[in-house]
Amino acid sequence: MRARVFPDYEAMSAAAADVVRRRLGERPSSVFMLPTGITPLGMYRRLVEMHRSEGLSFAEATFFNLDEYLGLAPDHGASYHVYMKENFYGLIDADPARVFVPDGAAPDPDAECERYEAAIRESGGIDVGVLGIGRNGHIGFNEPGSSFDSRTRVVALSESTRQVNAADFEADRAPEQAITVGMATIFESRKVLLLASGTNKAGAVAAAVEGDVSESVPASMLRSHPSAVLFLDEDAASDLGQGVAG
Ligand code: GLP
């Protein structure tokens, strides 16, 4: 796993958007997996700008989101459906038939997870998986302890994640459960790009890059991935020692 450190969030976001643009240039029908959260907003903003100013087209691409809260209907203001529509899918020329976000309100959540996993398989698999990282090292909503063999499934969110994400909800906690793409499914992405910004991610980044490869730090799984790269701003890289390539 390589790590590239950028001077600040804007530079990191620009580099991430360039990875997506280049991949689309090589193959317009590429399959992407995408994250939510604050971190990828700069990348999305740039991709939307590229669509508007350069005519960058996403019409042939396929998109899978990483996760969704369980119990939230797709029109719920805090749902990842709404987040993606407002920040990306609704602002570009994505084909709705090739945009997938887990349905948190599905009557049978386990069946929804199987359907989602099958849709990823049928798309030919993920070409580029873009990830954020939680302060506890989670990727998607794969909390510490998630099996590296796991597939798309319903998970319980940790108390700390529910508190960190509480701001989006009227109650003082995020929902208790979510649907997340599994660790093995993420690992099968041909390329993985993990974005991290800010000092509150520095500990998780250092644990993932320099600690043991362990299910207690989900992002550490990426160390054995043949094509995983971390894009960090200087703050997120601030706990790293000498062993990391620039
Ligand atoms: C959430 C999402 C993750 C995301 C993480 C970090 O829990 N499920 O996919 O990577 O938070 O979010 P942020 O970028 O806001 O720090």
Image (cartoon, rainbow, N blue to C red):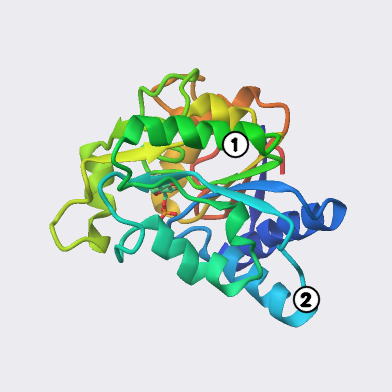
Q: Nearer the viewer, residue 92 or 42?
A: 92
Tell me: residue 219, above or below residue 23.
above
Residue to which mark 1 is pinned: 120
In the picture, the quarter occupied by the N terminus is: top right
| Quarter occupied by residue 80 | bottom left
Q: Residue at point 16% right, 63% down?
A: 170
Q: Nearer the viewer, residue 62 or 233?
A: 62
The reply, left or right, for residue 89 in relation to residue 51 is left
Tell me: residue 105, above or below residue 137.
below
Image x and y of residue 203, in percent: 42, 40
Image x and y of residue 20, in percent: 72, 56
The reply, left or right, for residue 13 in relation to residue 138 is right
Q: Nearer the viewer, residue 151 or 49?
A: 151
Q: Residue at point 29% right, 44% down?
A: 70
Q: Secondary structure at mark 1?
A: helix
> What amino acid type should be assigned to the residue bearing mark 2?
Gly
Residue 32 makes an appearance in the image: yes
Which of the numbered marks, if any, corresponds to residue 145?
none
**Dot 1 alpha-carbon crowd within 10 angstroms: few under 14, some 14 to 19, many 20 or more:** many
Tell me: residue 202, above or below residue 47.
above
Residue to which mark 2 is pinned: 55
**Dot 2 alpha-carbon crowd within 10 angstroms: few under 14, some 14 to 19, many 20 or more:** few
Tell me: residue 30, above or below residue 47.
above
Q: Secondary structure at mark 2?
A: loop
| Quarter occupied by residue 99 | bottom right
> What amino acid type should be assigned to the residue bearing mark 1?
Ile
Residue 243 makes an appearance in the image: no
Q: Nearer the viewer, residue 129 or 7?
A: 129
Q: CA distance from mark 2 to mark 1?
A: 27 Å
